[in-house]
Each structure stands twice: as C-alpha cells, then as structure tokens.
Amino acid sequence: MKEAISVMVLDDEPIVGERLRPVLEKEGFQVETFTESQKALERLEEKKFHVLVTDLKMSGPSGLDVLRYLKEHQLDTQAILITGYPTMERFREAEYLNAVFVTKPFKMEQVVKLVGEAAKKF
Amino acid sequence: MALLDLNQIISGWHKKKRPFSIQELFRKFQELLNNNGRALELIADMGEKMSGDYLFDKHYIESVVMELEDVIYRIVYDLNVITNKKHLKLFDAFEEAKKEIHEELNSRFTVPKGDYIYPLDSLHKELSDYVGEKMATLGELQTKLGLSVPKGFVISTYSYKRFVEHNRLQEWIDPILDMESTLDMETVAQKVQDLNRRIFQAEIPPDLEKAVRKALDKFNRKGLSETGWAVRSSALGEDSQLSYAGQYLTVLNVASSDITEAYKKVVASLFSQQAIDYRRNRRVQRKEPAMAVGCTHMLDPVTSGVIYSTNPNQISQEQMVISACWGMGKLVVEGEGKSDSYIVSKKPPYDVISRHIGKKDLSYGLDNKDGVVLKTVSHELQDKPCLDPAALSLLVQTASRIESYMKSFQDIEWSIDREGQLIILQARPLQVRCNLSYDKSQTGQAVKNYPVLMKDMGVVASRGIGTGKVFIVETEEDAERFPHGSVLVLRHTSPNMSRLIPFASAVVTDIGSVAGHMATISREFRVPTIVDTQQATKILPVGQEVTVDAEENVIYQGIIKELITAHLIEKTPYEESHEFRLLSRLLKKISTLHMIDPQSSEFSAGHCRTYHDMIRFAHEMAVRRVAEGISPRQLDKGSGSRRLKLPVPLDLIIVDIGGGLKDGTLGQVIHPDQLQCDPLRHIVDVLVAPGVWQSQPISLDIKGLMSSFIGNPGGTPFSSDSFKGNLAIVSKEYLNLSLRLGYHFNMIDVTLSDDTERNYIYFRFFGGVTEITRRSRRAKFLAQIMTKNDFAVESKGDLVIARIKKVTRQTMEEKLYLIGRLIGFTRQLDVLLRTDGDVGFFEEQFFKNEDFITTSPSA
C-alpha cells in the first residue's frame, strides 16, 4: 500500500489546526498541527512531511522562514501559505519558495483541494 | 473630533444662510446609499462565515468589525449633514452599540443590565445572556413550540452580578479564573475552598432578596398549596454548544423559606474544582462566568427519564433511545439501573425496536419536609414497563420536533405527571462523536425513492436540510397563520417576513439575493434557504410534505429522514470554537433588526440598538429628506437647472450632478435626445409612447370636486418653501425623480447599471386630490400592481413605498417601463376610484391595456 500523505498545519491561531485537522483526516491525510513555528521546525528536522500548510505572520520564525528552511534543506515538501494580507512582494517571495497562496478567511474546501493537488505530486 | 467637524459644517451653512447645493445634497445622499450597501454586504459576509464552510480567525472578526464601524459612522454622519443635525441621537446609539461590541471583542463578557427576575413563561433564546442557555431553551420550548415545562422563574445573571458586587467576591474569583495563572494545583484548590466558603457566608442584597420573595409569593399564590421548588443552575454557556453536563448543581424540593440558601449553593457550583477544570480543558476564554438560577415548581411525576433523539451507537438506524424510571428521573440521570430502556423507530408508527424492562424496586419521590427520598416501589409495579406505546410515541414525536427546531441531536429530560401530561425539564445538544459509523451510500439509496420537485433552480443562501409542509405566504394574514415547522415559500424576500424564519424548517423564494437581509437572518438561525428560484410558488404544492436539501440544491417530495440524519452527523462541530461563538454573539448585536415598520412611533434614532437598525433608519430618513423636496433657492442660478421639453404636458426641471446630459449640452431648454441618464431615458420613452399619458380631462363627481377645492390636500407634508414643480436629479446611472401630478407626490430613486448588486428602485407615492378613502384606494391599486411585479411593498393609508434591488439591467428596465406607465395611468386615478370594487376593475384595465409585464419594448 502507498504511504499515507502527511500534512503539517502550522498557525498560531489554534482554530486553524483545530478545524483543518478533521476535514483533512476525513480525506485520508495524516495530520499534525502546530501553533508555534519553532516547534514545527524542530519537528521538520525529525520527520518528512509531504505538505505544509502554514500561516505567514507568526511570532518567532515566520511562514517564510519555514519555507526557507525547506528550500535550504532541499526538501520537496509542497507548501501552502496562508495570509491575511497578500502583497505583491510577499507573493513573489512565496513563488520563489515554491509556495501557493491562500488568503484568510478561506473556504475549508479550498484548502482541502490545494492539499489534494499538492499530494498528487507524490 | 468628527462630531466637531459636523458642527462646523452645519454652523457654517447657517452663517452663510445658504442651503446645501443640490449637487452637494445628492452627493451626500448617494454616498450614504453606497455606504448602506457596503454595510449590508459586510454583515452578509459575517453571516456567511457562520455557515461552517469557512475558516476564519479572530483577526478576520476584528477587521470586519472595524470596517463596519467605519462605514456605519459615515452613514450616521452623512445623515446628520443632510438633515441639518436632526438625528444626533443616532451618534449616541452608535457609540452605545460600538461599546458593547468592543466589550465582546475583548472577551470581557459583561453581564448585561437586566431585571433580577424573569418568569419562565416570558423567556426565549435571545434572553440567554440574562437567564442562561438552559432556562432560555426551556422558555423557548414553551413559548415557541407550545410544549409543557414546569412553572417558575429565573434569578438572572444580572442578579448574580449584583450578588458578587454586593459581597465584593470578584477579587476572590479573579485569581481562580486566570488562565495564565502560574499557581500550583494545591494553591488553586485552597483558593477555590476559600471562595466557596465566602459565597455560603455572603449576604443576598436586600433588593434582590425582596424581588425573589415577590416572585415566590406570586407563584405560590397561584397554586393551591405551597409547593417545593427545584433550584437549578443555568450558567452562561451551559447547555449550549458546550454541555457542561453535570458540572453544576441542582437542589430539589426546596421550601420557599430556604430558596436563598439553595441559590448560594448553586452559585458556588460555578466555582467547584471540576467546573474550573472543565472550562480550562475546553479553552473557555470568557473571563467572567455568570450563573442564572432557575426556580421551578417541584413535580411529583409518575414516570421520568431521558430521551436521546438519535441512537448514538447506530445513528443511521433512525432510532431514538429512551430511559425511564418510576417517580423522578434522578435514578436515570445518575445511571443507577432500576430503569427501563427502549429503542423506538423515529418514523411513524414509531415501532418499538427493542426494550429492556429493569427491576425497578426503588424510585425517588418528594420527602414530606424537603428534599427527595428513595421509596420502595409496590410489588406489582416493579417489573411493569413504565411507558406504554402511546407514551413512547408521544415522546418520540416531541423529541423530533425539538430536534428539528434546535437543528441538532437532542438529549432531553422529561417527566409524565399524574394526568398523563408530558413535561420537558431540559433539552440540550446531544454530544455525538461517531462520524465513521455512518454509511454514506445508504443515504444515496434512500434519496432515490423520492421524486425530485426542483433541482438547481435558484441559489443556496443558507445551507442545511429542512423538512415540512409547504406553506406559501403572500399577505400579512398568511404570515399570521404560518404553522411553525413548515417550509416557508415566498414570492420575494422582505424584512417583514424575516420574523417567520426562526419558525420555518426551510425557506424557498422566487426572488431574492444571497446577500439580502433575509439570507442573513436565515444563516443566523441556520434555516436552510434557497433564493431566486423564479418558480417555487408555482411548483411547490401547498400542504405537500417536502425535503429541502440546501446542500445539493434539490427539493424532494416527501420527508427523507435519512438526509437529515446524514446532515446532522456530517457537520463538524465548529460551533464549539471560540471564534465561532464570538462571531455568533457579535452578529446578535449587529445584524438583528428591530426597526421594521417605518410608520411606527418606535422608528426613531433612540430605538436603534444594532448596526442593522441604524442602517435601516438612516436609509429611511435620508430618503424622506430627499423626498421633502428642494427649496426654490437651491434652484437659483448656479444650480445648472434646465427644462426638459416633452410632447406631453409634463413640466420637468433637470439638474445634472454628473454625466446625466450629453457633453456640450447648452441652453435652458433641452430635448430628450440630449439626456444621457439611463433610468430617466427609459421612463421618458414610456411617458411619450402613445396611450400612456391619460390626457383626456377627467370629470369629477361632486364629492371628488368638493374635495379638490380644498387645494393642497391634507397629509401632504411638503414644507411650505419647497419647490412645487417636477424635478429630476440625474447622473449617468442615477435618477431621483420628484413628481407632483394631480396633487399627489411621487418620488422615484433609481440606480441602473450593469452591476446587478448596485441596482435598485425606490418608489414612494402619497397624497392626491380627493378625500383619504379614495386616495387610499389608489394606494391599494398601486400596492397590488407593484407587488405583482415583484416589488417589496409597504403601504399605509395613502402612502405606498415599493422597493426592488439587486436585479439585472434587463429586469430593471422592465420595472422602469412599468413605472412609466403607472405615472401616466395613476395621475388622476383617485378621482375615478369611487368604490373599493373599482380598484380591481382598474387593475384589470391596467393589465389588459397592454401585456407589458412580459413584453416591454426593452425586453
């Protein structure tokens, strides 16, 4: 059997993980949620995730910092970046870091779809 | 600061003795209308987030609230600018509402100021902040569903606040509630004990004590003998999405003289160690818990128990689970055996699937003095089932009603008294966690057995599944007769009909918008709603049982229980999140509409409580201001006014506020082909069409004639210095047309564009040459025609207000064609309407003359 797709959800607002987890699990993904980016980075060192859904602005390392980590370590984790304020500059940087954008507030099914698309690459 | 600006602006006009220029007035008016639209959009957007489809965080809530505040402020400000500070009170109302909203946002839930005591039979859900969710629900079951509940009253959350303040308990409460507290467990436990001791020793404030005594006297006098009381917790948030089951205290069979002691015990249970742990584990961020306390007459029932409206182990089986014992339900609730259990089908004829009759040798009953005691059950009753098929069927039907009204599986406590009457003691959402045990394909199979009445017609405005009998509401009388739990079917949406939404199992309309007021209310009450179907009133047969699937946008004939169950399961329990609860509380303070009837004396700035009230009020007052007319001084040189030359005798002054006339239009007199204002061009085209302008002289009968000599008839509140002619304020897409024809006054305010969302027509008509009866007949004639043409109509006496909005350009053009014809047709119609029967005759004439509804020239 194919290995289950693992998804990391990182957002300092606990509601994001709380609500995304059950809908993603229902689709058959393995989900871990984090509210602190430092802890998420530590976990990335231990375990490979197929998909990362992360907030942009957080206290401590930001979403972009986490994306940079992925790039530096040449990980093929597919990233989905959540943000409240999309700016052109951020958009370019995220693009450079191979991430797709979602703006808050968003429809749950939208993220589920994006995670599904990202998962197809494995 | 901003208020100061306003004063400067307004005092500025007085100094110059110059009224607002027309351009300025209309610019402000349009700005106000735009802000109105924006505010309604924001409210609709917030409502949409409640559907469960979206993920939003606190930041979203804060930013949308801030934008809304800004927009509302500008509306209030602009209204005062154009009405010469007539509605300064609206600033106070705004500040008041804003303050409350900020208190919610900061999560410092403040107990609202209310009464000390609320009788149970006056309660409904909206009072849950005052009486706690448990008692509010009980009241709602009685007042809205007509179910029997115990008699009694509630000592409010405000009483609790008073009790805490009177005894200075807050300083003892705060450290216990501090979520970030670094205190160790032992210290917290010690503090909890201290607080409990203080509560037991505390004094009930004398005025509160007096109010409680008064309530006790009132309820004791009603009964034949002094009854004991059940004193029950009803904390804020208890029995809502968080159940708090068993966290707080109930004291049974309390004598009137001991009520205050029992009250303190129940209050203290708010701070028991287990309640504190429960709140912490569930991340309840409310810093200020509050306890309302219900005092209800003690029952001495034959049988009691609990019913679950679904079988939590086998949800797909469409069954309910009932536990019952003799006497009071304490044995069942405490789970001590000595009870029966039944599994009964949810569907008629409510077959008993299985039953287990326990050995019920003991039962709880009232003690002679106070409290309750375990008594031995007589031998012949011990093995006898305590519910017969009739009682089981009644229980299942009642639980079904509560489930569909509350829109969640229910956990209900009940008793049956010596007269065989079923009494509901408590109803709360049943916590079910078994998504995986449900087989989806089963629903698919079940659905195939039901004919589809409508599919993909219209737009889903509020998701969910609703079932019931079709009931079409067209008139106010229909609304009065609306049977609760039916499927509400409407031609179009109107704020007046919105009050029916909480009682409807689903709503389907021919016309309407997802962003409209009604859709917002539907989402707020989570009533499945499909709008803009065009044909629902024609397709859905009155009285037919239907299932409205507002998930897939299908309406089936018949009731599909499986679909409801599947939906109740599929819902992820998002309602429990802090953000959802916050948004829900905020929406209550923002989107609830109290200002419904513009003719009512309560339609005033001082009565505006929510932002929605302010929007509605400001809109009406701004329109009235514009309808009051323009002073002749405003039409002086410099206003750019011109005269439109028409082949019919209509003397029309045109003022262009931007793009309403072709570039390079010169001179005082202009021709229709120089008009660039779209809405006016449509109306003028109709007015000059053959047969539209009723130009033949109309003979007045004596009564009509006498009345016409009076001159300016009563009820036409033009200010004496307002311009008496016909006036059109125009831009490319906008028209404000004021007509004074045959002594009546007609104002039409229109925006016509390619953007459906911005389009609207506001039509206002009153006055006339004859006495009030005939003018009212004309109003009736107009109201009937406008209603048939999908306008939302309000009419009182000789005043008619008709609105339509958010429709396509093509529909707009059809409606403008209708209005053009009406202007011509109704000019002197009041004179002709001699009897009530004439209304129908002329209406027929009007429609007969030309089949314009379907075949307007622009269509």
Image: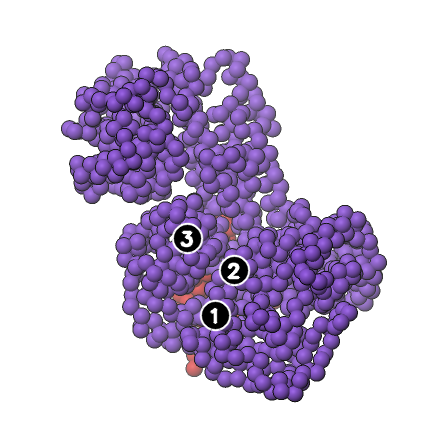
Chain colours: A red, B purple
Q: Position of residue B79 (x, y in %)?
A: 49, 29
Residue B819 occupies quadrant: top left
Q: Could you tell me how far apart the alpha carbons at marks 1 and 2 are, in whole angstroms?
A: 14 Å
Q: Which circle marks residue B481 in the picture?
A: 3
What's the residue at 51%, 43% (across, down)? B594
Residue B661 occupies quadrant: top left
Q: Position of residue B56 (x, y in %)?
A: 52, 55
Amino acid residing under circle 2: Gly
What's the residue at 25%, 28% (across, down)? B832
Chain-order first, disc 1 or disc 2: 2
Q: Which circle marks residue B397 in the picture?
A: 1
Q: Which residue is mark 2?
A: B146
Q: Is residue B84 above or below residue B502?
A: above
Q: Is residue B310 visible?
A: no
Of B325 and B50, which appears nearest the observer? Answer: B325
Under circle 1, the secondary element is helix
**Quadrant where the C terminus of chain B lies?**
top left
